[in-house]
Image (cartoon, rainbow, N blue to C red):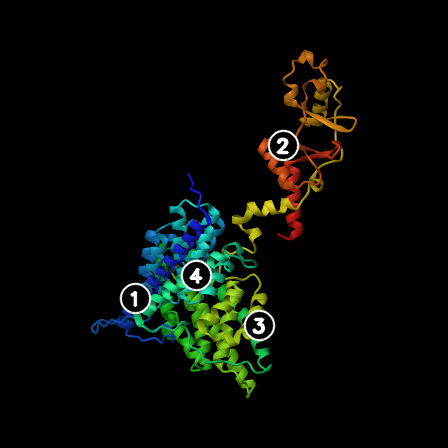
């Protein structure tokens, strides 16, 4: 039996989801840092640059053991693939799509083992240099905790979905140190053109709690921890000459975003159809990733350190261009093959390089350009994420929170709006639906909303209405049934509805009596009826509650105006959806 929870109890579960999501973010952060220090730092003997807000927390030293760094992603693919396909196959890939699918099509249900499998598999993928990020995994981890809590407390599907959103918001808000952006991302990422507004307040609450847990823990370990991932100088928008380049950044972000999406899913489909064991596919993907990072080492891992270098103006045009295309290929091979990792962090890097290249162009054309390359890096970051993730508001806010570059808000808004619009329906998240009307999660309420706005008058049948008189014989009605194929008729006296007679009523009369008994003797009196101005929602509920196929439609004086059936209601509903473009 389902327990009824008050709003206070449910808010407690949202708070608990935020706390657990924060702890999950801590565990994922430490696992990735630890495996990266072990594999890349020690076995690979490679030191990668890190962003200002994410200093390395672990170090290992094995002087006698060395493995070429470009082989490490294949090792990570082996470990990740074995763990995922042995214990939780749904944890493969970038994770966010699995969460979106769970919300729309699986009642928000995620198996309890998924968060743990996802965390460990992701640590091996990213920690060995695979080109992936933490967004998808932490989204699946946070959502998984929310789903597990919902199952434990036997919550309704609606409540489970809200806790799923809360878990995503908490995980994203913590790991990216973006509490507002994380909450907005959780409600935006489910749709291409809509927002899950019902979960927004709960997402805010979970995200800020998770963020507090995460930042508090990191501060306790280092006694000093920047609140944002990237360190940025103060930028000032002083003129209009850069505005065309912000628009150009949006245009290029849309184009490169579409290339990224097409490349990613082309690789994904190739690996999906590859005739080999599922757990071996990430190994093959890791080998291809290794080939890319052999040629372009900055494409290794999350590459956040190179974004920091770009912000600081320390990347060349060649480095930015090579990292842009290298990151697209490396991410497609790492995650598209089934490796466990997100696509958000690579998107940050790719977008940053798009922005950097636009910045180089602006400075070459405008000798007096007042904005450094770093400003364009942040603009490109926001615009690119808006294009590929279809989360324009969250993307803008997250970039600002991750960098602290709030002075660039107008520039990022301009580029993001352009990239979002120009990229059309292309999205890196294939499980997104356009609007709530397209989501199975909202199908019942969308039907209800549409029917509430349609009247019985708009759907009823009034033409060729066949009625019988109370003075007709039962035999007359039987002949009418045989002639028309109808199983029942309204009984009308002087224009007013007084009853209904059906075949089942007639079958209760013996054959020899059918010519002598009148309709008024066996008809059902005071039949169920609705008024023409009542809505279809009420009419449908009445049909279902009484398990009947039709209702009479009468005016205030009781005069029969028509008949409405379940089929009439469904036709009116479909017609209205078409009119609304849903």
Element under disc 4: helix
Element under disc 1: helix
User: Residue at horizontal 65%, vertical 13%?
Assistant: 510
Residue designated by label 2: 549
The reply to whether dot 2 and dot 3 touch (C-beta < 8 Å) is no
Instruction: From the viewer's perspective, tell me whether residue 186 is left or right of residue 465.
Output: left
Q: Nearer the viewer, mark 2 or mark 4?
A: 4
Furthest residue to the right? 494
Q: Is residue 392 above or below residue 7?
A: below
Element under disc 3: helix
Q: Picture coordinates of residue 379 (x, y %)?
A: 51, 74
Residue designated by label 1: 35
The reply to whether dot 2 and dot 4 touch (C-beta < 8 Å) is no
Q: Nearer the viewer, mark 3 or mark 4?
A: 4
Q: Is residue 277 above or below residue 75?
A: above
Depth check, front residue: 523 or 376: 523
The reply to whether dot 1 and dot 2 touch (C-beta < 8 Å) is no
Instruction: From the viewer's perspective, tell me whether residue 356 is left or right of residue 511.
Output: left
Furthest residue to the bottom? 367
Residue designated by label 3: 414
Q: Alpha carbon of mark 1 to alpha carbon of mark 2: how far?
A: 65 Å
Residue designated by label 4: 207
The answer to whether one can see residue 94 in this image is no
Q: Picture coordinates of residue 327 (x, y %)?
A: 43, 70
Depth check, front residue: 449 or 98: 449
Q: Residues within 10 Å of mark 3 (few under 14, many from 20)?
A: some
Instruction: Looking at the image, tell me whether mark 3 or mark 4 is earlier in sequence order.
Output: 4
The answer to whether one can see residue 338 in this image is yes
Depth check, front residue: 67 or 233: 233
Q: Residues within 10 Å of mark 4 (few under 14, many from 20)?
A: many
Q: Alpha carbon of mark 2 to alpha carbon of mark 3: how far?
A: 55 Å
Instruction: Looking at the image, tell me whether mark 1 or mark 2 is earlier in sequence order.
Output: 1
């Amino acid at each position: 039996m389902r327990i009824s929870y008050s709003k206070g109890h449910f808010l407690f579960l949202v708070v608990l989801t935020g706390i657990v999501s924060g702890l999950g973010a801590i565990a994922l952060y430490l696992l990735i840092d630890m495996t990266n220090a072990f594999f890349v730092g020690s076995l690979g003997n490679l030191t990668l640059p890190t962003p200002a807000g994410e200093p390395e927390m672990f170090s290992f030293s094995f002087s006698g053991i060395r493995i070429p760094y470009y082989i490490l992603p294949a090792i990570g693919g082996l470990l990740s693939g074995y763990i995922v396909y042995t214990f939780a196959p749904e944890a493969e890939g970038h994770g966010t799509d699995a969460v979106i699918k769970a919300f729309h099509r699986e009642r928000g249900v995620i198996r309890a083992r998924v968060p743990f499998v996802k965390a460990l598999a992701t640590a091996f993928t990213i920690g060995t240099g695979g080109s992936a990020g933490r967004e998808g995994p932490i989204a699946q981890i946070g959502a998984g905790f929310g789903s597990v809590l919902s199952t434990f407390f036997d919550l309704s599907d609606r409540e489970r979905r809200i806790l799923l959103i809360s878990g995503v918001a908490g995980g994203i808000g913590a790991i990216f140190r973006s509490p507002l952006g994380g909450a907005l991302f959780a409600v935006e990422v489910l749709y291409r053109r809509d927002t899950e507004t019902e979960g927004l307040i709960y997402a805010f609450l979970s995200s800020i709690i998770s963020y507090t847990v995460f930042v508090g823990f990191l501060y306790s370990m280092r006694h000093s921890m920047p609140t944002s991932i990237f360190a940025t100088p103060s930028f000032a928008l002083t003129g209009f000459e850069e505005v065309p380049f912000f628009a150009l950044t949006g245009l290029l972000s849309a184009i490169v975003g579409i290339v990224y999406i097409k490349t990613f899913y082309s690789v994904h489909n190739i690996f999906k159809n590859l005739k080999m064991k599922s757990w071996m596919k990430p190994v093959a993907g890791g080998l291809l990733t290794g080939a890319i990072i052999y040629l372009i080492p900055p494409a290794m891992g999350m590459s956040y350190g190179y974004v920091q270098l770009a912000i600081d103006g320390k990347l060349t045009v060649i480095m930015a261009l090579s990292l842009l295309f290298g990151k697209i290929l490396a991410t497609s091979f790492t995650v598209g093959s089934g490796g466990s990792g997100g696509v958000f962090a690579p998107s940050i890097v790719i977008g940053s390089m798009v922005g950097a290249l636009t910045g180089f162009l602006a400075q070459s054309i405008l000798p007096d350009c007042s904005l450094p390359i770093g400003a364009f890096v942040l603009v490109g970051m926001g615009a690119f994420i808006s294009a590929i993730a279809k989360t324009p508001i969250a993307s803008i806010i997250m970039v600002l929170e991750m960098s602290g570059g709030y002075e660039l808000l107008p520039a990022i808004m301009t580029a993001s709006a352009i990239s979002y619009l120009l990229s059309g329906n292309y999205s890196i998240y294939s499980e997104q639906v356009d609007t709530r009307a397209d989501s199975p999660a909202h199908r019942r309420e969308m039907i209800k909303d549409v029917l509430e706005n349609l009247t019985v008058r708009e759907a009823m049948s009034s033409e060729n209405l066949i009625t019988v008189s109370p003075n007709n014989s039962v035999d007359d009605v039987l002949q009418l049934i045989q002639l028309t194929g109808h199983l029942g008729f309204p009984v009308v006296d002087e224009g007013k509805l007084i009853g209904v007679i059906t075949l089942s009523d007639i079958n209760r009369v013996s054959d020899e009596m059918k010519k002598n008994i009148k309709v008024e003797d066996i008809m059902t009196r005071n039949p169920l009826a609705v008024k023409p101005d009542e809505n279809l929602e009420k009419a449908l509920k009445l049909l279902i509650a009484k398990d009947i196929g039709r209702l009479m439609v009468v005016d205030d004086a009781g005069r029969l105006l028509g008949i409405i059936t379940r089929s009439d209601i469904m036709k009116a509903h479909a017609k209205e959806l078409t009119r609304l473009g849903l």
